[in-house]
Image: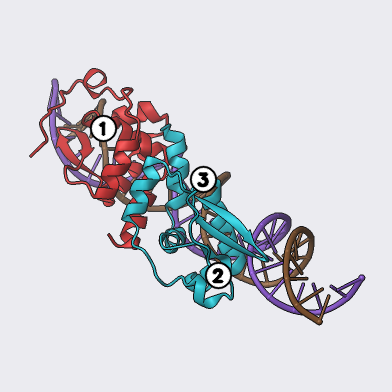
Chain colours: A red, B cyan, C brown, D purple
Amino acid sequence: MDNSLLEKQLKAVADLNRIKLLACLKNSEVCVCDFVDVLGISQPAVSQQLRKLKEAGIITERKVGTWKHYRLVEEQTPLMMGILEQIEPMSTCKCETDCTHVVVQGNKG
Amino acid sequence: MDNSLLEKQLKAVADLNRIKLLACLKNSEVCVCDFVDVLGISQPAVSQQLRKLKEAGIITERKVGTWKHYRLVEEQTPLMMGILEQIEPMSTCKCETDCTHVVVQGNKG
DNA sequence: ACTAAACATAAGTATTCACTTATATTATAC
DNA sequence: GTATAATATAAGTGAATACTTATGTTTAGT
């Protein structure tokens, strides 16, 4: 892995709010509205953070009506696999209970 | 590993110049003057970057006369071990040839 | 078509960050 | 003790960053 690419991915995760996003995503798909609650920042702020993770190739999205579900991409780089392993999962994200829409599991290809 | 501690270490390595420092340090001990050459930034800038890595517990130092040799700490966190593995080593750092002082190997205990 | 909800984008702002130059510290050489 | 060399610290500056509020876009419901 090129060191510049490495920097890009490291920058993407070197932020506590984005680490929390990933901590939530370790469990399941989560939608934007949940993150607003968990992080205590505004909805646009969440959207911007999610975009950064997406641009780094770490997460991907799926549209469900007016909602947008985010999840980890299946194919992570070795770097990201190692980092994700070290992130403590957060169960505070509860897409199932807060939103009225159902989380579809089985995004494994 | 606590997510705040995780953030601290990730922030410490999420910078191309500091990645290059680590890339050099994968090979051997390196002194400040070498880094100035390799990074093409001023000596104070190098010192400041090295301090960040030191404060994150990633590198340590050793005084040799007026020089200061930096090296990776032996006990890295699992996180850092994974990251260091992904950093491409740089042979551009040549403490042995540029400086007039000898690199002492065997910092393993 | 109109309204409301969920999210994205735009614009503005305060903070953080990484450099610079200038100066202080520490150790060697004379 | 004085000068020089290697490094650290201090102070200042421009760029990047992460939030805010305001507005645009898309979809669902009526």
Amino acid at pointer 3: Gly
Q: Is residue A45 visible?
A: no
Give neighbour class at mark 3: few <14, some 14-19, many 20+ (Cα, 10 Å).
some
Q: Position of residue A60 (x, y in %)?
A: 20, 43
- Read off the chain for label 3: B
Residue A108, picture quadrant: top left
Mark 3 falls on what kind of element?
A: loop
The label on residue B83 is: none
A1 with respect to B58 (left or right):
left
Q: For mark 3, what is the residue?
A: B57
B18 over A60 or under it: above or below: below
Disc 3 and disc 2: Cα gap in Å? Answer: 25 Å
Q: Which of marks 2 and 3 precedes in the sequence?
A: 3
Instruction: State whether discs 3 and 2 lie on one chain.
Output: yes
Q: Position of residue B3 (x, y in %)?
A: 41, 34
Q: Quadrant of the N terminus of chain A?
A: bottom left
Q: For mark 2, what is the residue?
A: B102
* Mark nearer the viewer, 2 or 1: 2
Mark 1 falls on what kind of element?
A: loop
Give neighbour class at mark 1: few <14, some 14-19, many 20+ (Cα, 10 Å).
some
Q: For mark 1, what is the residue?
A: A26
Mark 2 falls on what kind of element?
A: loop
Q: Is residue A7 visible?
A: yes
Amino acid at pointer 2: Val
Residue B92, picture quadrant: bottom left
Q: Quadrant of the C terminus of chain A?
A: top left
